[in-house]
Amino acid sequence: MLTTLDNLPWSIVILACLTLGLAPFFPEPHVWEKLKMLASGTLARPIDMVDLLMHAAPFLVALAKIAAMALKTPG
């Protein structure tokens, strides 16, 4: 798993965050709408949960890649 994260280029991760993670862009990013629903307790339908997971996945990959870089020992 860590080698997969290491082999995944940052350009792909950033592109995924900016496209899939934030789409649709107007009136507000979909992931932001779903996070607001989660915070208010209205994220109840399964389709909304899957939608949140799909739009948050690129950001989770980016966080995992950062964590893997931080935990990697030099040498």
Image: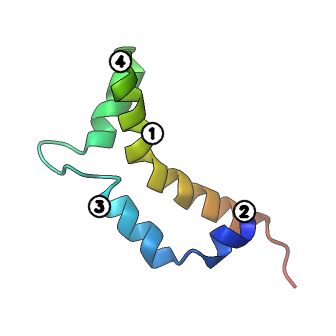
Residue 4 location (% of width, % of height): 66, 70
Residue depth check, mark 4 versus mark 3: number of the one nearer the observer? 4
- How much space separates mark 4 and mark 1, taking CA atoms? 13 Å
In this rendering, the answer to whether 8 lies above or below 56 is below
Q: Earlier in the sequence, mark 3 or mark 1?
A: 3
Q: Is the residue marked by circle 3 packed among few (<14), some (14-19), or many (20+) residues within 10 Å?
A: few
In the rendered image, the quadrant that contains the N terminus is bottom right
Q: Earlier in the sequence, mark 2 or mark 1?
A: 2
Say whether marks 2 and 1 touch (CB < 8 Å): no
Q: Which residue is mark 2?
A: 1
Using the rendered view, name the quadrant where residue 46 is placed: top left
Q: Earlier in the sequence, mark 4 or mark 1?
A: 4
Query: Type of residue at label 2?
Result: Met
Query: Type of residue at label 1?
Result: Leu
Q: Secondary structure at mark 4?
A: loop
Q: Which mark is residue 45?
A: 4
- How much space separates mark 2 and mark 4, taking CA atoms? 31 Å
Q: Earlier in the sequence, mark 4 or mark 3?
A: 3
Q: Which residue is mark 1?
A: 53
Query: Type of residue at label 3?
Result: Thr
Give the tally of numbered discs. Answer: 4
Q: Secondary structure at mark 2?
A: loop
Judged left or right of residue 58, residue 23 is left
In this rendering, the answer to whether 36 lies above or below 6 is above
Residue 67 location (% of width, % of height): 68, 59
Residue 42 location (% of width, % of height): 34, 15
Q: Which residue is mark 3?
A: 19
Say whether marks 2 and 4 touch (CB < 8 Å): no
Colour scheme in use:
rainbow
Q: Secondary structure at mark 3?
A: helix
Say whether marks 3 and 1 touch (CB < 8 Å): no
- How much space separates mark 4 and mark 3, taking CA atoms? 24 Å
